[in-house]
Structures are given as structure tokens and as C-alpha cells.
Image (spheres, rainbow, N blue to C red):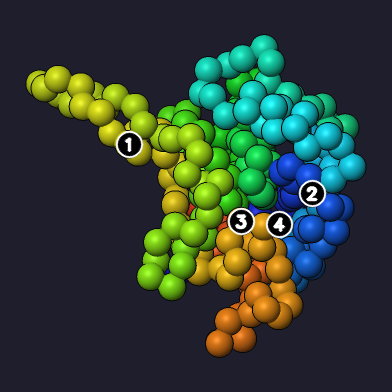
Amino acid sequence: MEQQLPPKMTVYHVAGVATYPSTFYECRRRLERLLGLIGTEAEFETLFPYGDYSRSLWRQVWEVRSDLARRVLPSRIGGRSMVKEIERTYGGAGPILFIGHSGGGLAAYQAARLLHQRGMDAELLRVAQVGSPKTPIDDALQASVAYFYAVDAAGKPDDPITRIGGWGGWRSVPGRMPQWSRVRHAPGHVEGLPVIGGHTNYFRHQLPYVDASSRSNLEKTVDAIYSWLKAGYSSATLIKG
């Protein structure tokens, strides 16, 4: 039986460094149409946790670094600024989906982590990190986080930003010494996307970002997020939303 989605949800597009306000426009249109086809009503907001293209690039890069570590740091900026905006805009109807590109994926996860620490059920949170640096994910949120990265024609990673950071940690094994695992704190879903042009182009929808099968980068990215979202929302609690 096909998985169901809740009747209402709030979608936050989360921008990375030096992003233009129009970046997520077509992403919103396609996702809104896909959700509408199955009867899910979505509210959309776009957040700029580090500022937009008009703000100092190096200042934004420094702030992204504060959201990269697993430890809770008082210097965290992106996640905390997002929570303030969520408190202002989230109406409480249904779960929250964050779609964060590049550094925005870090801020999105840190915001979800703060919301969870403040009592929000992990099942009401979904984070899609797109072309983001790797940051360790808490066990309680691993099933709520997906990671999408660009790959080339041979299936090899094709986005240098996704080489930053890591998911490593010690894994306990009964009766044996703890073992180091590179994916101990990885998101619950990790998927390579054959997008054209790498890091800055996941949401492009026109030539030359359309492949021989007439599928654009935007379609591949949004459709992958949508498929992951559908696969995860099967609980009765969420459907009652």
C-alpha cells in the first residue's frame, strides 16, 4: 500500500551562503504541485539564516562553520536564528519539512535539533540536506534526516562542499571493543543525484541543466525529496497531523 502524507505541513526552504531570493521559486512550485496531487496542503517559507547575497560572504562562511560541529556551541548562529523565525511563522498545523541547500542544510538540521530538544516530536520533523557539508546527526533524529549530493556519470561524488565534515563515531559492539565507523552518525537516508554542474545547480530547471531524458536538475532533486518524504510518513500520528 502506498505511503500517505499528512493533510497539512509547513515547508521551510533554507538558503546557504550568498543565495538569491529567487533560488527556491521553482522548487516551491514543483513540490507544491506534487503535494497537491495527493491532497497535502503546504505552507511555504524561505529563510536566510546567514543572510542573502548582499551580506559579507566571509562573515556568512564563518557563521556556517559554527553550525558544523556536533557539540552544542554558544556561537551557533544559523540554527538559532531559524528557530526565532519558525516561532514567528509556524502555525502548528502538521509536521515541518526543511529543505536546506549547502550551509542551509546545516542550519536546518540544527534548527530541527533545537526544536526537538524543546519538546517537538522527532516524527514531526523532516530535514532534507542538499549539497551540504556533513555534520553528525543525533540518534533520535537520524530517521528524520536525508542527505542528497551530486554525482557524475560514473556515480562518483561531484560536489566539493559535500566532502567537508563527516559522520564518523564509535559504534558499540556487544562483547567486543568499540569500533570506529565513518557513518555512525549519518542521516537515515543518503542518496546521490546525477545533477549537471555540481554544487550551485541542484535547483536549476533550464538548459544546460537538462539531461538527454529531458529531466532537469530541479526535477531530480525535488522528486528525490518527495519520494523520501512519502516513504517516511506512514504513522497514524502524522496522518492525523
User: How far is disc 2 from disc 3 in space, using C-alphas?
Assistant: 12 Å
- Give the structural element (helix, strand or loop) at label 2: loop
Q: Residue at x 25, y 28 (%)?
A: 180
Residue that badge 3 annotates: 199
**Residue 136 visible in the current orientation:** yes
Three-letter code for the amino acid on which mark 4 is drawn: Pro
Callout in the foreground (2, 1): 2
Q: Earlier in the sequence, mark 4 or mark 3?
A: 4
State the quadrant of the N terminus.
Answer: bottom left
Q: Residues within 10 Å of mark 1 (few under 14, many from 20)?
A: few
User: How far is disc 4 from disc 3 in space, using C-alphas?
Assistant: 33 Å
Numbered badge on residue 19:
2
Mark 2 in CB contact with mark 1 (< 8 angstroms): no
User: How far is disc 1 from disc 4 in space, using C-alphas?
Assistant: 37 Å
Left-right relation of 104 to 52: left
- Give the structural element (helix, strand or loop) at label 1: loop
Q: Quadrant of residue 116?
A: top right
Callout in the foreground (2, 4): 2
